[in-house]
Amino acid sequence: QIGQSDVQLPEDQNDKPVEEGSMVLPVAANFAASPLKGQLAIDFLCPDDSRVRKVFTRRPLGLDFDRSQPIVMKRVKSDSHAAELGTEEGWRVVGVNDQDVTTMNFTETYNLLKSATQRLPEVQ
């Protein structure tokens, strides 16, 4: 399970390169030089072309998306931090901690999310 506070892959995938496909992010983030200390800010582009920012403060995030760029929310776990914040399916990630990710490839964007998520406190 991947979340936007502390992104963790299942144990069997932690040392494997990220590939195209489906994945669920846990909620743990490690944002090394984030201007938002202790938080993960994700900017989304909604289907109606509006933009929304959600600020995550713990993991797991409770987000599910395909391993492709752009990262689009495929599912939001109903009892998750993401659901509490009002994150919706179909939203596309366009920014992470004030960094535009629209020109990045999937691996770059995913690694940015994962890094930022690993520093968030884990709350079950």
Image (cartoon, rainbow, N blue to C red):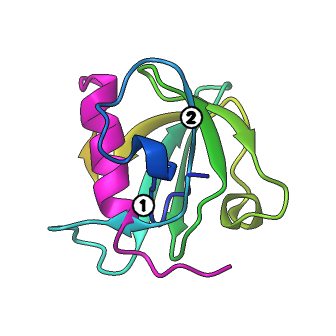
Residue 64 appearing in the image = yes
From the viewer's perspective, is residue 82 above or below residue 112? Answer: below
> From which residue to which does the magenta span run?
101-124
Three-letter amino acid code at the position of disc 2: Met
Name which quarter of the figure residue 97 lies in.
bottom left
**Percent x, y for residue 52?**
56, 48
Magenta span contains residue 105: yes
Q: How far is mark 2 from mark 1, CA to CA? A: 20 Å
Residue 9 appearing in the image = no
Residue to which mark 1 is pinned:
41
Secondary structure under badge 2? strand
Nearer-the-camera pick, 60 or 11: 11
Name which quarter of the figure residue 106 lies in.
top left
Residue to which mark 2 is pinned:
23
Secondary structure under badge 1? strand
Toward the front, the furthest residue is: 12
**Percent x, y for residue 93?**
47, 37
Left or right position of 97 against 10: left
Q: Which dot, 2 or 1, sits closer to the camera?
A: 2
Residue for point 34% across, 30% down: 18
Residue for point 52% across, 41% down: 44
From the viewer's perspective, is residue 122 above or below residue 94? Answer: below
**Percent x, y for residue 79?**
83, 64
Left or right position of 119 against 7: left
Residue for point 61% across, 52% down: 1
**Percent x, y for residue 94?**
41, 36
Nearer-the-camera pick, 63 or 103: 63
